Image: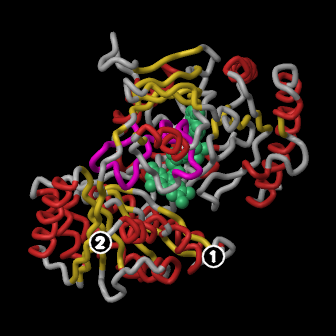
């Protein structure tokens, strides 16, 4: 019984027995609080919740709770806290870093039923919505008023505003209009103890400490969000988009920096490399230049006069930076066609590979070409292909590593490749996450980005909100032990090195 295999078998059996006991306890505690159809725990019922958009990692929760009222959310949180049972909040499950991945001994708290738009204030240009409302549904609801909600993650058809707040999500238009943080005024929710809390206000400032920026991007670790008040933006009367081709990645990267350096803040500034444009063009026929080493999409919006002036300025900068071809959308149909390619980049990747892992890091704009060339070298090093599509104006990369998750060796090389991209981004002055959060995926990379003192400050904040560590434990903030183990390694380890450290 001393072999590693025997030890693993004993641990797995102990975990199974523990799970069964805990499940009985939790079902007994929650059954009086929710109607029977709002508790899923039998048979295959919890399978749809076993992962988020990071499908390579899966875990069954003990139970899924689907409350419909804030009173039910509070009651579930109180009961789970009393039993010291982890609670993982879940919106639409489109997250790409495993933030909503269940805990083996925890409850997944689905907020899917919180899907009502509470009130739209036309005069204040705000909307108060429940946390499970889809991002795009807000813009659809206020379109007749000539307004929209500006942050537009590519997943906006499905992802929820609660998930957007928890991840501080971005999108194509965030370069000009800001991230979720800049478009949210007030958040209402519940603490780990089930107590109601509000962060921010509908006024421009809040009395005392402003905790709103702390909760935005907190990945379900500080509070469960139930209601959000967002700013609404007047819809611009016109938008036009330039597609610019470059025969060299470095020229394209430098053109991005040149646009911003010229004092222009485009409504969107996105880049795709050659493998990505090939995959996308084959799928949606957006009219992309297949000979280009990279293409840029640069959008201008505003009044017709503002757009005409800005398009002229951008054309001058792009041509001066060495663009081999530029094309300006002649009408709305062509503009949407240009964007259809960008918006379908992820599904297009799904057509050319059994699986893909979408990485998310940031890099100073002036280093864009350097990181893309480094990623090309990594393709050879790890023997896997990678397509790049990203928010170039923000320096926010999204390398899509193509692999087959059914092949353990490819899976392992993909994790090493991903960790390498994140650590190289840090070495070039960037960060390990731009907009997809840390979740479980980037725990080890956080050891590279932050010093022990910085990580301890994060852990202290977590303890101040959630002393028992009930809310989404094992995510975002790496343990001291994880970082010590990771630091000892001479060979780089994969993204999820030491997964056992996050297990009970
Ligand atoms: C095809 C595709 C494209 C994408 N494009 C973008 C993009 O352009 N920009 C971008 O930023 N992201 C993008 N994403 C990632 C993802 O859509 C966003 O992170 C989104 O905000 C997640 O929302 P969700 O409702 O699916 O949250 P989930 O995945 O369910 O949860 C995400 C995190 O938020 C927490 N959470 C969810 N709801 C609550 C709540 N009510 N209270 C407290 N915590 C909560 C969860 O615990 C988890 O940690 C993309 C994903 C996909 C699959």
> Is residue 170 covered in magenta?
yes
Residue at the image point whose x is 67% and y is 21% from the top: 70
On the picture, is 100 further left or further right than 28?
A: left
Would you call the spot at circle 2 few (<14 residues within 10 Å), some (14-19), or many (20 or more)?
A: few
Residue at the image point whose x is 22% and y is 59% from the top: 365
Q: Give the range drawn in magenta.
A: 156-180
Quadrant of residue 259 within the rendered picture: bottom left
> Is residue 100 covered in magenta?
no
On the picture, is 247 further left or further right than 4?
A: left
Q: Nearer the viewer, mark 2 or mark 1?
A: 2
Question: Residue 1 in the image: x percent, y percent?
Answer: 83, 55
Whether residue 495 is visible: yes
Residue at the image point whose x is 82% and y is 55% from the top: 9
What is the basis of the colouring in this image? secondary structure
Marking on residue 354: 1
Whether residue 479 is visible: no
The answer for how far apart the CA atoms under marks 2 and 1 are is 37 Å
Residue of label 2: 330
Residue 412 drawn above or below residue 308: below
Which is more toward the observer, 241 or 4? 241
Question: Regarding mark 2 in the picture, which secondary structure is present there?
Answer: loop
Q: In which quarter of the image is the C terminus?
A: top right
Residue 329 drawn above or below residue 275: above
Question: Residue 330 in the image: x percent, y percent?
Answer: 29, 71
Residue at the image point whose x is 22% and y is 69% from the top: 253
Question: Residue 171 in the image: x percent, y percent?
Answer: 40, 52
């Amino acid at each position: 019984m001393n072999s590693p295999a025997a030890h693993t078998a004993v641990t797995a059996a102990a975990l199974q027995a523990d799970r069964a006991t805990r499940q009985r306890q939790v079902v007994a505690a929650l059954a009086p609080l929710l109607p029977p159809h709002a508790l899923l725990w039998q048979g295959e019922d919890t399978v749809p919740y076993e992962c988020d958009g990071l499908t390579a990692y899966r875990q069954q929760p003990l139970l899924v709770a689907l409350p419909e009222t804030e009173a039910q959310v509070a009651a579930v949180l109180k009961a789970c806290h009393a039993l010291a049972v982890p609670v993982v909040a879940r919106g639409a499950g489109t997250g790409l870093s495993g933030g909503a991945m269940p805990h083996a001994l925890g409850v997944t708290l689905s907020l899917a039923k919180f899907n009502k738009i509470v009130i739209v204030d036309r005069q204040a240009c705000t909307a108060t919505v429940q946390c499970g409302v889809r991002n795009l549904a807000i813009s659809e609801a206020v379109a007749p008023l000539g307004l929209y909600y500006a942050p537009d993650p590519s997943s906006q058809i499905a992802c929820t505003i609660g998930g957007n707040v928890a991840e501080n999500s971005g999108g194509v238009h965030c370069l000009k209009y800001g991230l979720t943080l800049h478009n949210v005024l007030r958040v209402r929710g519940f603490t780990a103890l089930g107590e109601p809390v509000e962060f921010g206000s509908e006024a421009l400032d809040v009395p005392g400490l402003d905790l709103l920026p702390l909760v935005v991007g907190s990945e379900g670790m500080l509070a469960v969000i139930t209601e959000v008040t967002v700013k609404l933006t007047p819809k611009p009367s016109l938008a036009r988009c330039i597609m610019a081709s470059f025969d060299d990645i470095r020229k394209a990267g430098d053109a991005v920096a040149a646009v911003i350096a010229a004092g222009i803040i485009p409504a969107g500034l996105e880049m795709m490399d050659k493998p990505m444009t090939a995959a996308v063009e084959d799928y949606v026929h957006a009219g992309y230049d297949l000979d280009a080493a990279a293409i840029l999409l640069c959008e201008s919006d505003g009044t017709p006069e503002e757009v005409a002036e800005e398009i002229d300025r951008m054309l001058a900068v792009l041509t001066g930076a060495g663009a081999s071809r530029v094309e300006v959308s002649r009408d709305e149909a062509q503009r949407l066609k240009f964007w259809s390619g960008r918006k379908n980049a992820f599904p297009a990747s799904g057509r050319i590979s059994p699986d893909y892992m979408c990485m998310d890091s940031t890099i100073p704009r002036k280093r864009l070409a350097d990181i893309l060339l480094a990623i090309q070298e990594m393709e050879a090093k790890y023997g896997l292909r990678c397509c790049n599509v990203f928010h170039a104006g923000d320096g926010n990369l999204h390398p899509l590593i193509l692999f087959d998750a059914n092949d353990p060796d490819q899976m392992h090389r993909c994790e090493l490749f991903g960790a390498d991209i994140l650590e190289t981004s840090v070495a070039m002055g960037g960060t390990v996450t731009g907009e997809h959060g840390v979740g479980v995926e980037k725990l080890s990379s956080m050891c590279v980005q932050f010093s022990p003192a910085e990580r301890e400050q994060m852990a202290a904040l977590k303890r101040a909100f959630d002393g028992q560590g009930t809310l989404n434990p094992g995510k975002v903030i790496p343990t001291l032990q994880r970082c010590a183990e990771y630091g000892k390694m001479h060979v780089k380890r994969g993204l999820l090195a030491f997964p056992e450290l996050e297990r009970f």
